[in-house]
Amino acid sequence: MPGKKRHIEDIYEPFPLKKRVPLSKAFPEVAALWDFKLNGFGPEDFSYGANVLAWFRCPKGPDHVFKAGIFAVCRSFQNGSTGCPYCANQKLSVTNSLVNLRPDMAKEFMEKRNKKKVKDIIAGGATPYWWQCQNNPKHTWKVSLNSRLPYDTSCPKCEIGDTIDLRHYPKVLAQFDHKRNKDVDPYKLSIKNKVHWKCKVGKDHLWISTFNRRNGERCPFCKGSLASSTNNLTKHKELTKQFHPTKNKPLKPQDLSLTSSEKIWWKCAAGRDHEWLAAINMRVREKTTCPFCLNRKLSITNCLATVFPKLAKELHPTKNGKLTGKAIVATSTLKVWWLCKNKHSFFQMVRKRTLEGQGCHKCYLSQKSYRQHHK
């Protein structure tokens, strides 16, 4: 169990590093964030695994100064982040405050009803807040900043009607396909009619939908709801190789998104019966491989009769019912009856015999007694 974290201010002199690697050498990128003025010591005085709370200064904001465990910051870098709570929107900063980033939305924030000052609000988060329309004070609504900011939404009551002005939704307007919507006015767009949209991420990111349906949604191709040249199965070479050539027809790898939850057939080259059903997104996310190669499913390549033919012959001929060596995975935890060459029957786990080399206990005791007697 890790010891109690110590504040760097409480340390008069660091412990000798001895064979431990100093932070400055192990993680120079973390050492670059080291606040020498607040810490007093240098990053060369502590190991990268030190259980010490030290001060760090992130270059992405003038007020991004934070205190954190040395090892915790190193671990954050390993996971692809800096460990800065301001960059992660966990603490308020001049770089992430709603007042600085979206002063227009800050004016709509209802301080009394939310029981919070707008100057203390981070531009983001799932907490729903109350807002008041600047055009009509009677219009109030409740929604989180995570729902407002990405799609630049405004007062929903002002938008109720047959048409909508996409200038109020600049990110949505950027995806309006002007060429394919020749006779459609994006500034007086009917909310009932389907129109063409396009996304700049991919040439084939083209789709048709009403505004209401796509309001608050990302591009269906970027989201992974639909397959495209940027997200289809062919982008994953290993999975494409295992795409079953016949059982998925008429589907092809390019027809399927890497984030699809659809279960399809897979085939592994390691065995002719290595065929199984699995969802695409589970294989991508969990990085799963062939269940037969992992000995999680029975195959002709991993059964007891194939891998350990001699042991398969020792299965008891009558006490296991119809169970044979072809129906047992060689590394199984299943307990079965065995019959040794000396006609001793015993009940033992399969993997104990195949992986650990255990055999007949009576024969073992007999041999042990013989060796002791003839010393």
Image (cartoon, rainbow, N blue to C red):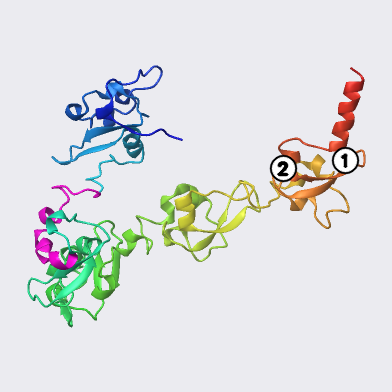
In which quadrant of the rendered view does residue 260 lie? bottom left
Is 325 drawn above or below residue 369 in the view shown? below
The label shown at residue 350 is none
Q: Which residue is mark 1?
A: 340
Q: Quadrant of the C terminus?
A: top right
Counting from the top left corner in percent of width and height, residue 14 is at 31, 21
Quadrant assignment, res 372 = top right
Residue 112 % position (x, y) = 14, 66
Q: Is residue 340 left or right of residue 43?
A: right
Q: Which residues are magenta?
A: 89-114
Mark 2 to mark 1 CA distance (whole Å): 16 Å
Q: Residue at x 46, y 35 (%)?
A: 1
Q: Residue placed farthest to the left in the image?
A: 135
| Earlier sequence position, callout 2 versus callout 1 | 1
Residue type for callout 1: Cys
- Asked whether 107 falls inside the magenta stretch, the response is yes
Q: Secondary structure at mark 1?
A: loop
Type of residue at label 2? Arg
What label sits on residue 351 in the rendered view? 2
Mark 2 element type: helix
Q: Residue at x 46, y 62 (%)?
A: 261
